[in-house]
Image: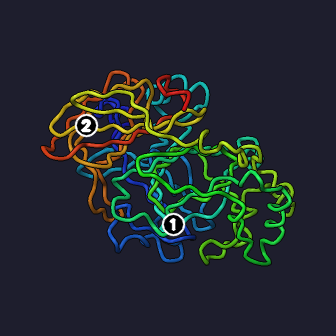
Amino acid sequence: MPAIKEVFEQGKGILHLAPTWVPRGFNEPGKRLRLHPDDYYALGMDRGGICERWLGSLAKALNGPKTGETEGMSYVLENEETKTLRLFKDYVDELGAELIGAALMERYGTWPTFAKLYDYDKPLFHHLHLTEEKANKIGMHGKPEAYYFPPQYNCSYLGRMPLTYFGFDPSTTKEQVMKCLEDYDKKDTRITELSRAYRIQLGTGWYTPAGVIHAPASLVTFEPQWNSDVNTIMENVTMGEVNPHNLLTDCAPEEEKNDLEAIFNQIDWEESTRPDYKETYFRVPKFKNESEEAVEMWVAYANDWVAAKEVTVLPGKEYVLTDQACYCALVVQGHGVFGAFECEAPELVRYGDITGDEFFVSETAAKNGVKIKNTSTYQPLVILQNFANNNVEVPKTV
């Protein structure tokens, strides 16, 4: 295998990542991730369908007893001819600040975030992700997250329910929610009747703090998030699918698994019931830069954890993309050149194939600028970037 430093230098500070597919034993694939129709159950019927693609990930999926040793973790393509792959984590561990920058290395000792494309045909269950404090009790990190709904992956089908439930209606009482937890194994509690739903708008996004209960819509969603996979599912029946009791208790410490009050207290009640939830957490894109060559728009911003940007390079144009922090990049439309690499959004992918749409850009390369060329005469080249919380250019307010 080539040396890590050699691969890094050949890419001029940019790494080419292979796609990372994650199956789930719940819900159903929406089949919009551009995988071949025969490959959505490539890991076996007992593992469930592939509903997620993880991007720039060091996190291992929390996916039951049959979870693969590196399931959810990204790999770097080291040689195009031999298709040699090595864990992205090995690159972060060896290169450290040279790859992710001194600020992230000093504060976290690693790349602390990743992004997903998730693709469920049905809405997800009403659930929450633990706060940092609660997650630390089980040796994990909290999981705040942002959403952006790319038109390129949602242009033909929005799934069975393009509505997201966020939190609870402000009139909801704690006793009503506790009653749903008490009845989890007895009847369909219909907990979302206590919530409020918003129809999703393509080309916009939301931010969801850890501890806020939510039931995401059935759209393909680009989801920058903290480096974790911790969930507490509080809805026991979702569109006719029964969610087993262990999904309520899996992320509770052993001594709290039978303590419904402790599980209830995983909810950030103040944030989950705030009257101005949409005004606080809905995200309309904010322009960073617009020229004859390209448009840059922030699509996740105004939080302490993650950020994301959409970059559109116009047909036939060249553009130098400059940023103040490292990031993962995903090409969602078009084809061209990204730094030293050919890039293209795939149309149809077989499980195990390499694609030319995912890259990790070091902090130095980001600051020096990545030269992008759109080689199409007709369509734009569109790229999504996800950052951690160290990019000083990210808007701080809505």
Q: What colouring method underlies this structural image?
A: rainbow
Instruction: Please say if 175 is above or below 285.
Output: below
Residue 302 is left or right of residue 154, and the answer is right
Above or below residue 218? Residue 343 is above
Give the number of the disc on residue 161: 1
Image point (21%, 29%), residue name: 292
Does the rendering let one see residue 93? no
Number of residues whose C-alpha sits closer than 10 Å to that of mark 1, classed few (under 14), some (14–19) or many (20 or more): some
- From the top left corner, tell me how far across and down residue 255 is, in percent: 86, 57
The secondary structure type at the circle numbered 2 is strand
Of residue 254 and residue 386, the one placed in the foreground of this image is 386
Residue depicted at 60% across the width and 44% down the height: 278
Q: CA distance from mark 1 to mark 2?
A: 32 Å
Indicate the position of residue 242 as horizontal and vertical percent values: 66, 76
Quadrant of image for the C terminus:
top right
Vertical relation: 244 (above or below) 218: below
- Quadrant in which residue 213 is drawn: bottom right
Q: Tell me the tag on residue 313.
A: 2
Q: For residue 340, which numbered disc appears in the image? A: none
Residue 157 drawn at (x, y percent): 38, 65
Type of amino acid at the residue the image marks with label 2: Val
Q: Earlier in the sequence, mark 1 or mark 2?
A: 1
Within 10 Å of disc 2 (Cα), the crowding (few <14, some 14-19, many 20+) is many
Q: Please name which of the two marks, 1 or 2, marks the residue nearer to the observer.
A: 1
Say what amino acid the circle numbered 1 marks.
Met
